[in-house]
Amino acid sequence: MASLFKDQTKLSAYRDRRFPGTQEEFEHALLTSTTVYVGNMSFYTTEEQIYELFSRTGEIKKIIMGLDKNSKTPCGFCFVLYYSREDTEDCVKYISGTILDDRPIRVDFDWGFQEGRQWGRGRSGGQVRDEYRTDYDPDILLVTYCNSVGGYGKLVQRE
Ligand code: GTA
């Protein structure tokens, strides 16, 4: 089947600041990779649940859970590695937006997993985007406050 994802600009709005190559190499990686990034996940979603959902579009090679670099616990994202490009494209097409553990997950093409990418890069240990959240998230049991200058937020334990 012909690929529906020929134009890199439509593939992903995300640019990994830590990608080691040129913009051209990044775009080529997105067009050929068999890895997806999954975001907006509940911290309680298990690898088994991910396996169950993501194997609907193809055979999975590996799942890598995203972890808080301080607590070493899941922090709301993962990488799913497929064997085939067609299965990867089907995953982005059909699974993105699915509700998993009451949350609409976001599936994005990824340039490829490398050791170290499983850790949240935020200052608190989790994902950077969580430090900018202003809404209460019952799954996370934390409230994130943005500070007025747009710097890193402060995590406050829910009482
Ligand atoms: N393929 O969308 C993605 C993606 N994200 C969000 C993270 N990763 C992704 N991969 C793909 N697509 O390996 C990967 C990273 C890394 C791991 C953890 O997940 O490549 P991270 O989320 O902790 O850190 O990554 P990252 O990606 O370096 O953070 P970044 O790019 O600064 O910001 C992520 C998001 O946070 C932004 O897209 C934006 O929505 C939000 N954000 C950042 N800064 C601000 C700000 N000032 N105000 C509001 N929102 C902000």
Image (spheres, rainbow, N blue to C red):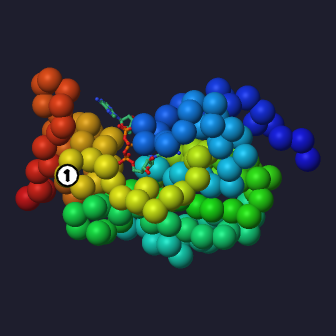
Q: Is residue 13 above or below residue 83?
A: above
Residue at the front extreme of this rendering: 21
| Visible residue check, residue 103 | yes
Residue drawn at the location 24% of the way across and 55% of the way down:
125
The front one of 111 and 56 is 111
Q: In which quadrant is the C terminus drawn?
A: bottom left
| Visible residue check, residue 135 | no
Q: Is disc 1 placed on a helix, strand or loop?
A: loop
Identify the residue under disc 1. Answer: 124
Quadrant hosting ligand 1: top left
Q: Is residue 44 left or right of residue 142?
A: right
Residue at the bottom extreme of this rendering: 48
Q: Position of residue 19 (x, y in %)?
A: 49, 42
How many numbered circles are shown? 1
Residue at the left extreme of this rendering: 159
At label 1, the amino acid type is Ser
Q: Quadrant of residue 21?
A: top right
The front one of 136 and 125 is 125
Residue drawn at the location 73% of the way across and 29% of the way down:
7
Residue drawn at the location 52% of the way across and 53% of the way down:
38
Q: Position of residue 28 (x, y in %)?
A: 68, 38
Q: Is residue 4 left or right of residue 116?
A: right
Q: Is residue 71 above or below residue 8?
A: below
Q: Position of residue 48 (x, y in %)?
A: 53, 76
Q: Quadrant of residue 151?
A: top left
Q: Position of residue 20 (x, y in %)?
A: 49, 43
